[in-house]
Image (tube, rainbow, N blue to C red):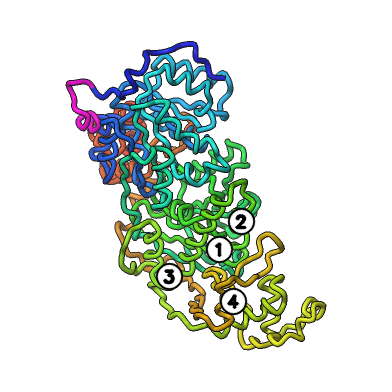
Amino acid sequence: MESSEASSEPLQEGRPRGPGPRESSPGAAHRVLREVFGFGAFRPGQEAVIEALLCGRHALTVMPTGSGKSLCFQVPALVMEGLTVVISPLIALMQDQVSALRLAGVAADAINSGNGRAENIAAWRRVAAGETRILYMAPERLMTERMLAALARLPVRLFAIDEAHCISQWGPAFRPEYEDLCRLRELFPGVPIAALTATADEITRIDIADKLFGGRVEQFVLGFDRPNIRLVVEMKRDWKRQLRDFVASHAGESGIVYCLSRRKTEETAAMLAADGVRALPYHAGMEKEDRDAHQNIFMTEPGVVVVATIAFGMGIDKADVRYVFHTDLPGSVEAYYQEIGRAGRDGAPAEAHMLYGLEDIRMRRQFIEDEDAGPERRRREHKRLDALLGYCEAPACRRVALLDYFGEEIGPCGNCDVCLDPSERVDGTEDAKKILSAAYRSGQRFGAAHLIDILRGTATDKIARFGHDRIPTFGVGAERGKNEWRSLIRQMVAVGFLEIDIGGYGGIGITDKGLGLLHGDGTFLYRKDTIVARAPAKARERAAAEPPMAGADAALLDALKALRLELARESGVPAYAVFPDRTLIDMVRQRPRTEAEFAAVNGVGAAKLKKFAGPFLAAIAATLEDEGEA
């Protein structure tokens, strides 16, 4: 596949080569930022990471989604001479980043299984000839002896590992080559390695630092708080109705709905479309052309809802996503945080709404047990899930619980369901004992529905068949409704009094902690589930940053988005690779009339100025003429 016929100069004792003597590294970095990417200043945290890499030091960087992690390795890649190799987990993400870099005038390539053989050979020849500055590959392709030997003959100056949490979370099982990346520091001594992720708790960071860097790495961890995102977790009752009510309350707004399976994604998108919502599915099983088309529509047209698996989101930079809705429990706090981080990047109010119930817990436990991994790995993943369940059942401010997981302390946020609609924790010890008794006396073999029938004294055929209408617990909880008992059982599972037999048929068993409670040791406090009331979208109070664009500004923004989509289709790239939303918004605010003014727009670098100034200035001028401003 790859050809290694051509070679370049060898590594000079493995040390990265910095910028020429006429310009300091900081000065060169600012020049690249301004001239190539069109930004006047670095965002918080970026410059320190870039300086470390330019000085030849390793860097582990944790930055929130949307904070500009890619520039942390793209800028030093262009300041240094030689080649930067970027390791990325998803082919679609690689292709989109390569497209965006090429539009910015950067010589970038990707070698992956999504390309044809001839395309990969041509890309490698450009790399070997020194024409390519940034090369994207998956770890599986990089960590072959043939590729490593070929790269050893080239002036590799930097490795960048994107989505670096995969080293800890995927390494031993699903993506073993991610763990194999630890060999890079030995094979390329002196070449700095950047590991970047949006989500990594302290345990994950320690794991990455040990595996990838042998413990010797500078860590850069930015704050995790996204205060403009309202956090809501709701008990799953009738998920279709709950989702439809939520989406209806956000009518006309862009959102992302996450589903666990491809089939559910398709069916949910169809259901919302039948309600008149512009809803489009997105998952890895779709044809690439369809995925790209749906992504472009989402990026360009207002009020579009994407119903997706986790295949959607990495690398997407859409500023005005007003909500992220989880129809199923995510796999971990890290996954949840990363997914909700796609909302509200413009700083305006957004909402993260999650549904979850007992079946979600059983399903997630089952996924962990079914994974081809050792006992230590499974133990860690169960602990990660425990942390997410703790967040879901948080008795106080939900944001405090979320940020505490990442080691960040804040006070109550005032922008989560628990803060906005606080409910006292109630002593449910006696009811918990009734549940424990029902589970114990029925043999710890049955699921929640059957236990609830025992507690409520419901004379089903199954109850009669097993004789459970004759046990002392039958009917002791008739005064409570099914949802109340289901909520209590869910919370008892979440806090460890009960467990789900994931190796069998989902039966509810009693833990050692639960046996202690049954025998009088301890108490069980629970929080009453509240039904989230939904006001119409126009009636909802919005606290924030900037009012949405209206009138002439909104019309100009729509015109610029339409032009962006047209130019993206001509270039065969996703719409946001032409310009992200925030650049179009800056165009609307500045309304440039000349190339010099267009060059001052945030996100317009030299290559994009040359390529796109003409059509965008014409579109702006036409709109101004229609408004009578010209």
Q: In the rendered image, is residue 156 in sight?
A: yes
Say if mark 1 contacts mark 3, CB within 8 Å: no
* Residue nearest the viewer, comparing 269 with 428: 428
Q: Residue at x 50, y 28 (%)?
A: 142
Q: Give the alpha-carbon distance from disc 1 to disc 3, as whole Å.
A: 17 Å
First reached walking from the N terminus: tag 4 or tag 2: 2
Q: Which residue is mark 3?
A: 417
**Which residue in the structure is indicated by mark 1?**
243
Q: Which residues are magenta?
A: 20-31
Image location of residue 630, percent across then percent down: 26, 40
Q: CA distance from mark 4 to mark 2?
A: 41 Å
Secondary structure category for the residue under label 1: helix
Q: Is residue 604 left or right of residue 274?
A: left
Q: Nearer the viewer, residue 499 or 278?
A: 499
Residue at image point 39% right, 42% down: 209
Q: CA distance from mark 2 to mark 3?
A: 25 Å
Task: Find disc 2 in the rendering and name its residue.
Answer: 268
Spatial CA distance of label 3 from label 4 is 32 Å
Q: Are marks 2 and 3 in contact (CB under 8 Å)?
A: no
The alpha-carbon separation of the residues under discs 1 and 4 comes to 38 Å
- From the image, state whether disc 4 or disc 2 is nearer to you: 4
- The answer to whether one can see residue 257 in this image is no
Spot occupied by residue 177 in the image (x, y as percentages of width and height): 53, 35
> Mark 2 or mark 3, which is nearer to you?
3
Q: Which mark is residue 515?
A: 4
**First of labels 3, 4 by sequence position:** 3
- Name which residue lies at 37% across and 33% down: 193
Type of amino acid at the residue the image marks with label 4: Leu
Mark 1 or mark 4, which has the lower sequence index? 1
The residue type indicated by label 3 comes to: Asp
